[in-house]
Amino acid sequence: MSKINYRGSKSALVLTGGGARAAYQVGVLKAIAQFMPRNHGIPFPIICGTSAGSINASALACYASCFHLGVKKLEWIWKNLTTDQIYSSDASHVLGHISQGILSSFQADYANKPARSILNNEPLRVLLNKVVDFKRIDKNILKGYLSALSITASSYNSSDSISFYQAHKNISPWNRAKRRGNKTQITCDHLMASSAIPMLFPSVKIGHQHFGDGSIHQLSPLSPAIHLGAERIFIIGVEQPKEGLHKLENNPHPPSIATIAGHMLDSVFADTLQSDLERMQRVNNTLKLIDKSKQKTQEGLKNIENFLINPSHDFNAIALKYYNEIPLSIRLLLRTIGISDESESSILSYLLFDKHYCRDLIKLGFNDALAQEDNIRSFLSI
C-alpha cells in the first residue's frame, strides 16, 4: 500500500461537529476515495475531529493505511445506523433516565452523583468499542501512514477547549488563551466527551475534569491542525443554505424554545469556523506583504492553504421528511419543547440517527464533492 511520509506531508483534514449531520462528511470522503488509487493511504496524515466529527476522524485514523477501506467501513456504519445504537430510545429507558437525573439532584453534595442529561448515550460507547480499534492508531503513526490524530473536547471545569492528540514524538503540546493541546492515547472516553451535545448527552470525566462537546468553547477550530504542522487544511463544514428562509423571516409568531435551541446549536457548530477562516485569511494576506526572506523570522506565523466544502441543501428540510422514523418516546419528548413535523427547529437534524436520513446526507456529500472534483483534485494534488 502507498504510504505518506509524515515528515514531508502537511495536509490536514478537519471534521466539524453536528450530531447525525456528520453522515454528510462520509459522503464527501467517499467521493475523494474515488479520486484515488484503491490501495492508497489516507491523503490527510493529520486528522482533527470535533463532536460527531471526532468519531469519523478516529475511524479514519484506524485505517490510515488504506483510505478506501476506512471510508467503506464508515459508510456501512452510517448507512445502517439506528437511533438505539446512539442513545436509549424506548419509553422505559427514557423515562427511567430522566427520573434518575431528577432523583440525583436531591442527593447530598458528598454523594457520588452521575452526570445528568436528557438522553442516555451509553449505547454509543458500546458501538464505538465494537467498531473502533484504538490500538491501530499508534501502529499507523509508527509505520508512517498517519502523523497525528486530534480530538477536541470542552472542559466544564476550566471552560477551555482541550485538543487531545496522539502523534509522533516530534509534536509538542501547546498552550494558548482558552485552548491547549494535551498529548495522550486516544480512547473511547475522548470520543464520548467530544460528542456529548450539551444537556442532551452526559459529560464525561477524563482525569480530574469533566468534558462535553468539543464545539462549545472552540473559538479556533483550525488551531489543532495548525499546531500539529498543517500547511494545507481540507475542511468539511456544516454551514448550510436556509431553504424556506422567506417563510421564517415573515413568521409573525415569536420563536419557540425549540427554534431558539436550534439556533444556539447552529451557532456552536458553524459560526466559529467561519470566523477562524477569516482570521486565517487575514494572516495569509499579511504574510504576503512581508519579504520572503523575513517570513521565517515571524514566529508562529505561516501561510495556510484551505479548502472548505459545505452542504448545498438544508439538513433541516431533509430531516423533516423522516420525522416519523424517530422512536415514539423521543417524538413525545421533543414535542414538549415544540418540535413537530412542521417545526422550524434544527434540533431534529442533529438527533435523527436514522439510516434513511443518514443515507440522504451521504448522497448529498458525495454529489457536492463530485461537483467540485477538479478543485479537490488540484488542492490535494491527486
Image (cartoon, rainbow, N blue to C red):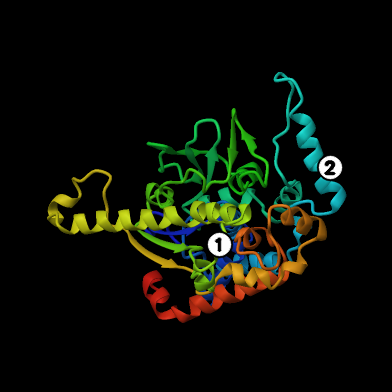
Figure quadrant of the N terminus: bottom right
User: Residue 148 at x, y = what percent?
Assistant: 48, 50
CA–CA distance in space, label 1 to label 2: 43 Å
Instruction: Residue type at mark 1: give it.
Output: Ser
Count of labels in the image: 2
Identify the element where label 1 is drawn: loop
Q: Is residue 96 left or right of residue 313?
A: right
Question: Which residue is more in the foreground, 27 or 352?
Answer: 352
Q: Is residue 330 left or right of residue 360?
A: right
Q: What residue do we see at 63% from left, 49% from top?
A: 134
Q: Give whichever of discs 1 and 2 has the lower sequence position.
A: 1
Question: Which residue is more in the foreground, 99 or 296?
Answer: 99
The residue under label 1 is 65
Q: Which mark is residue 287?
A: none
User: Residue 196 at x, y = what percent?
Assistant: 63, 46
Q: Residue furthest right?
A: 92
Question: Which residue is more in the foreground, 203 or 132?
Answer: 203
User: Residue 241 at x, y = what percent?
Assistant: 49, 70
| Image quadrant in which you'd find residue 253 | bottom right
Instruction: Residue type at mark 2: give it.
Output: Gly
Q: Is residue 265 visible?
A: yes
In the rendered view, tell whether residue 74 sits above or below residue 200: below
Figure quadrant of the C terminus: bottom left
Q: Is residue 143 visible?
A: no
- Pointer 2: residues within 10 angstroms few (<14), some, or many (20+)? few
Q: What residue do we see at 40% from left, 39% from top?
A: 172
Q: What residue do we see at 34% from left, 57% from top?
A: 231
- Which is in the foreground here, disc 1 or disc 2? 2
Q: Which mark is residue 96?
A: 2
| Image quadrant in which you'd find residue 70 | bottom right
